[in-house]
Amino acid sequence: MSLSQLVLDAIDRLKQYNLGIYNAVSNRFGLSGVGGMANNWSRHSKDIATACEAVGSLTEASAASQSNAAASAAAAAGSAQSAQQNALATAADRQATGQDRQSTAADRQTVATDKAAAHADRLAADADAAATAADRSAVATDKAAAHADRLAADADAAATAADRSAVATDKAAVHADRLAADAAAAAAQTWDPTNYLRKDAPVDVTGQVKVRGGYEWPYQAFFSSAAAAGVRGHYLTSRSRGTSAAPVAVQNNDSLGGLAVGGYDGNGWTYGWNGGGELTLVASQAWTSTTKGSRWEFSTTQNGTVNPVVRLTITDSGLVAIGAGGKLTIASGDLPVQAPDGNTVVLGGGQTAQYPFQVQVAESAHTTSRRSTLSLGSVWQWISDIAGSGTRDLGLWSNALGAVVLKVLTTGVTTFLRAVLSPPVNLGNVSGAINLDLSLGNTFNMTLVGTVNFATPANLANYVGMYFTLNMAQDGNGNRAAGWASPAFNFAGSTLTLSTGANKIDRVTCFVYSATSIHVISKKGY
């Protein structure tokens, strides 16, 4: 609160009433006399009243101020609590605000990174745009160049067309010149028009027609045809005797046609028959309307000679004959010779000599070995010169055993790897005369049902050195006797009496000693 100027002036005068003598300088309120309450009482009283009134007013105002201060204190206490709560809330808000600021900072960093990436992308896009612009410029340049090339090509095409037209004109002129030259040559009789082959119709030619080329490859003359299936595309030659106007049938051994191949030898040309080779079809009989036999002959010229010789012939019946002294040599691999089921591969035959060599397996040309081998399937092999040392013995090799099972020396001595067996010959029930066939085997089993008589075996000379055994059993009655041809069966000065008991078996071993003598030993009573 503020005091009014009147109250302040009154209070100031009250303070000066006892100050002593007023003077003009200090008496700024216009007091009478020399100052003091005596001379200025009335005014002094008014000043006191004014001051008291002011004090009362101030007291009231103070009371009101104190009441207001209490209210303000209470309000301030509430405000303080609220302020504390607000401070707590503010602290929480500040913490949240800090977190928000951190997030905001991270977001700002991300935004900054994104802005940098976007800026880089924009720079790259600008570079791409610049490159695209450069490419478009280059494409435009290329298009312009292509257009210029096309214009040049069109000009070249126009020039080429003009050139072709000029060439066609030249060809026509050349053709006209050729026709004129041909007509002039015909008129001058410098060539025979019949020796020129027409394309549209057959032409008879007398003499030779030569086709000469100037190129090494691929050919000197070319023949081609186009026709339906089954139509021949042959190069045809035909032969007769007589003349073209009056042909006569070909005879045996006449050449019907073929292919002769020769060359230039440095001095002159050869024509196959005088150097080179020939493939010739030859009549193999005199020809008629029903007999037209033929054979193919292949000829070559041996090194160091000048005349070709027939090396291989395919006969009229399909046989393949290799010329005298010729060899069928396999460069590599095998040479299968096969016959269909039910047929036979025949090697040799047709010779008339008493002792022909029909099939021969030649020996090795090795320095020491003279081996030759004939394989039978995958298991057996006949081998000459088994050891490969030049001895020329003969062996039968078994791949299954990995050994020679039969060996024949050049001296004729024969050895076997395993036992040599022949099945017994069962004569059954016998009586009367018995004629043994020693070719059937080495063992003969029989049951005597009556008296028997053994004759001298046929062709005994063929079996000298052979052993054979007779197993003779008595029947259920027994007492069966045997007689032996003499002098063939020799019992060393005695004879043989058989066992008499029923079902007894006597074993008689015989050795063919000579063409007329058989040595006999026996064991009885089995």
Image: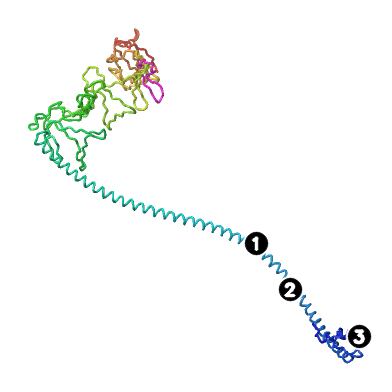
Question: Which residue is outermost to the bottom?
Answer: 42
The image quarter in which residue 377 lies? top left
Inspect the image, locate mark 2, and give the three-letter code of the amino acid beneath it. Answer: Ser
Q: Is residue 517 visible?
A: yes
Q: Secondary structure at mark 1?
A: helix
Q: Secondary structure at mark 2?
A: helix
Q: Which corner quadrant holds the N terminus? A: bottom right
The image quarter in which residue 487 lies? top left
Q: How busy is the neighbourhood of tag 3: few (under 14 within 10 Å), some, or many (20 plus)? A: some
Total number of numbered discs in the rendering:
3
Q: Secondary structure at mark 3?
A: loop
Inspect the image, locate mark 1, and give the three-letter code of the amino acid beneath it. Answer: Gln
Q: Which residues are magenta?
A: 386-407
Question: In the picture provided, is 518 more to the left or to the right than 311?
Answer: right
Q: Identify which residue is drawn at 50% across, 55% down.
A: 124
In the image, 308 versus 254, the foreground residue is: 308
Percent position (x, y) of residue 379? 37, 26
Question: In the picture provided, is 110 more to the left or to the right than 178?
Answer: right
On residue 102, the disc is 1
Inspect the image, locate mark 3, and give the three-letter code of the amino acid beneath it. Answer: Ile
Q: How busy is the neighbourhood of tag 2: few (under 14 within 10 Å), some, or many (20 plus)? A: few
Tell me the residue that label 2 is attached to.
Answer: 82
Tell me the residue that label 3 is attached to.
Answer: 21
Going from the N terminus, do you reach mark 1 or mark 2 first? 2
